[in-house]
Image (tube, grey):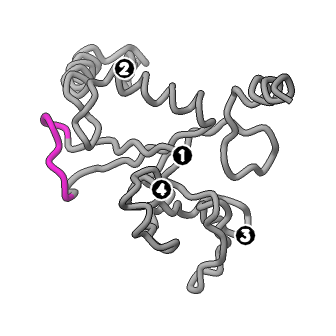
Amino acid sequence: IEPTVKSARGGQLAKSINDALRAMWRGWTDEAVDTARDLPFGELQRAVFRSFIRDGEVFTRHIEGAAPIVHRGPIAYSLELLEADYCPMDRWGTTPAAGNRIVHGVELNGWRQAVAYHFLDHHPGDYELHRLRSLLDTRRIAAAGVTHLKHARRIGQTRGVTVLHGALNRLSDIKD
């Protein structure tokens, strides 16, 4: 990422500001910026890409400012990475207060814009937790704080489809 802030006079690149932004970017990406503190930034990007290719979508929650987390480094910004499994496909209904529809765990307004996402507190593959959780054990997170990267095949599609779906269908046909 190369900052290209220009001065108001003349439209020339503002070297001092761009150098400061570049240094801040390097300082932020040198730390493990995910909330779990597991991955350096390069590994984080690869993990997001792998999840996107495998599942067809990935969610990133943006944690900014004075959140109940200790941010690393001088910039108060962290990323919470959520695989598609955390947003349950079987979550349907309406929200009583706003009258929005919930489709596949995504809360949509009348224009089919994402208003919020409903995420499970724990991964559904965690055997012990999976047995104990109820279907309503989700947390609602406003869409303004979430990036939903998805591979959509149709207009108006709520959730993503794996880019491997064509190959998987063919493999299934060969198996049959």
Count of residue discs:
4
Taking the image as shown, residue 5 lies to the left or right of residue 36, namely right
Distance between mark 2 and mark 1 Cα atoms: 32 Å
Which residue corresponds to mark 4?
Answer: 144
Please state the horizontal and vertical placement of residue 33, each as a whole percent of the image: 26, 34
Q: Which mark is residue 3?
A: 2
Query: Residues in magenta?
Result: 68-75
Compared with 143, 162 (above or below) is above
Name the residue: 39% across, 52% down: 126
Name the residue: 23% across, 30% down: 32
State the residue in front, 79 or 103. Answer: 103
How would you classify the magenta stretch by its main secondary structure?
loop
Distance between mark 3 and mark 1 Cα atoms: 24 Å
Distance between mark 4 and mark 2 Cα atoms: 24 Å
Q: Mark 4 or mark 2: which comes first in sequence? A: 2
Please state the horizontal and vertical placement of residue 172, each as a whole percent of the image: 80, 29
Taking the image as shown, residue 114 lies to the left or right of residue 66, namely right
Please state the horizontal and vertical placement of residue 114, each as a whole percent of the image: 61, 59
Name the residue: 22% across, 36% down: 37
Which amino acid type corresponds to the residue marked 3 in the rendered image?
A: Gly
Q: Mark 3 or mark 1: which comes first in sequence? A: 1
